[in-house]
Image (tube, rainbow, N blue to C red):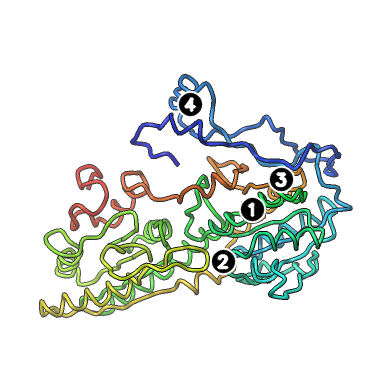
Amino acid sequence: MLPQNIDVDLNALPKMDFSIQRLGTPTLDSPLKEAIFVEDTERICYCADAARNQLFLKECKMMPAFLAAGPRRRIFHDPAWTRVGIVTCGGLCPGLNDVIKGLVNTLWYVYGVDNIFGIRYGYQGLNPAYKLSPMVLNPDVVDDIHSEGGSILGSSRGMQPTEEIVKTLDRLNINILFTIGGDGTQRGAHAIAQECQRRRVECSVVGIPKTIDNDLNFMDKTFGFETAVQAAANILSCAHNEANGAYNGLGLVRLMGRDSGFIAAYASLANSVANFCLIPEVPIRLEGPGGLLEAMEVRMARKHHAVMVVAEGAGQELLSGQRQTDKSGNVLHSDIGVYLKNRIREHFAAKKIDISVKYFDPSYEIRSLPANSYDSIFCLHLAQHAVHAAMAGMTDMVVGNWQGYFIYVPIAMATSSRRKIDPFGMLWQSVLLTTRQAKLMDGQCGPDSKATGI
């Protein structure tokens, strides 16, 4: 989203292409009889601020807006001749099975598509070298998978040779591919869509954005995030109980958040026992007056217990070592949780102050959970809108949610950069007001104490 305290870069707007690619002109009547159809003229404004929209119109002679999601009156793919592939990639996330079930049921019951295949273990399943047979999917197969965590299809990280993937799609006569995954998965989907176009393979490539960190661009929310926040908030209660149960007790909780601290921030708001919240967007200063270690001393002297939440990507500037990447190209961060645990113990030992540090790292426990009810509903909506787009012949796009509306976003835009917390925005200000850490930590909380009203 656009930060609310800076001017809009009007020069950047013409470079933002909101248009959605299509395989061709839809000529078939939709099998939906009583649906509320969406016209291609329906758009959702990029910016909700009326004054800024007037500025857009004045300076750029255009209103930047996304194509509204929903069923179309005419479709491109004939359901009787449609063969669908569904693939889940990257790390596990609550809601994967919900999306798979939503796709299968919408295709089968709404559009009458009965040739649906699950691609096993991510993009590896589309590379013949791995010899992985597709899984036949139907409503009976997916009937109760939403109650389970993980993905019935399995997953893997990293892209496979794009040419081999497209050859496999062509050989299997798959003309719709749904890619469920995060930034790396959708970049791969973009490459697949481009290669399909180059080879004149008529295949709609439609992404459903999956990132538990909630950091995909042009998305207010991605599935799995609410479940992760709910689970993390419960862990904070455990950390608080452990901290309270010892003299100078510290409950230190490391949460997901490679480049963005949304889970840490929202968990700290959902359960206001957190006294310190550390995120990648705000550098950490450990030493000296107003540093984290001194702030911990002050907190312990006053209350004799504390809860600290740290996102996995926070404080990387404190850690040395060569940065490596995983198979998806993501930087593998050093473990800030273990570093803080050891550094805090060393600091208090040097001061001859007793401290009891209880360390929590629930990342994999959270990732493998089934989705909660709110995420399940969100997953179903994403799946339905993805099917509507694919059947209408749209391609090289992902389904998103923006300003409360479901939208279609070109993959190139969605993967252009990562969404991050604005250190001077309302979300971070709310965290500072809740934790009250700005009273103890100078110069490393985003806005200063006067600016935040603390």
Q: Which amino acid does label 1 sit on?
A: Gly
The circle drawn on residue 64 is none
Q: Which amino acid does label 3 sit on?
A: Ala
Q: Where, by quadrant of the figure, is residue 368 drawn?
A: bottom right
Q: Is residue 273 left or right of residue 229?
A: left
Who comes first in sequence, dot 3 or dot 1?
1
Who comes first in sequence, dot 2 or dot 4?
4
Mark 1 crowdedness (10 Å alpha carbons): few <14, some 14-19, many ≥20: many
Q: What residue type is labelled 2?
A: Gly
Q: Nearer the viewer, residue 130 or 351?
A: 130
The circle drawn on residue 207 is 1
**Residue holding disc 3:** 389
Find the distance from the CA under tag 4 to the CA under tag 1. Answer: 29 Å
Q: Where, by quadrant of the figure, is residue 340 drawn?
A: bottom left
Q: Which amino acid does label 4 sit on?
A: Asn
Who comes first in sequence, dot 3 or dot 4?
4
Q: x, y (%) of residue 380?
A: 67, 55
Find the distance from the CA under tag 2 to the CA under tag 4. Answer: 39 Å
**Residue holding disc 2:** 158
Who comes first in sequence, dot 4 or dot 1?
4
Q: Is residue 204 left or right of residue 95?
A: right
User: Looking at the image, which residue is at 51% across and 61% down?
Assistant: 212
In this rendering, is residue 287 above or below 243?
above
Who comes first in sequence, dot 2 or dot 3?
2
User: Looking at the image, which residue is at 43% across and 68% down?
Assistant: 234
Find the distance from the CA under tag 2 to the CA under tag 3. Answer: 26 Å
User: Looking at the image, which residue is at 23% across and 42% down?
Assistant: 451
The circle drawn on residue 53 is 4
Observer-side mark, 1 or 2, equals: 2
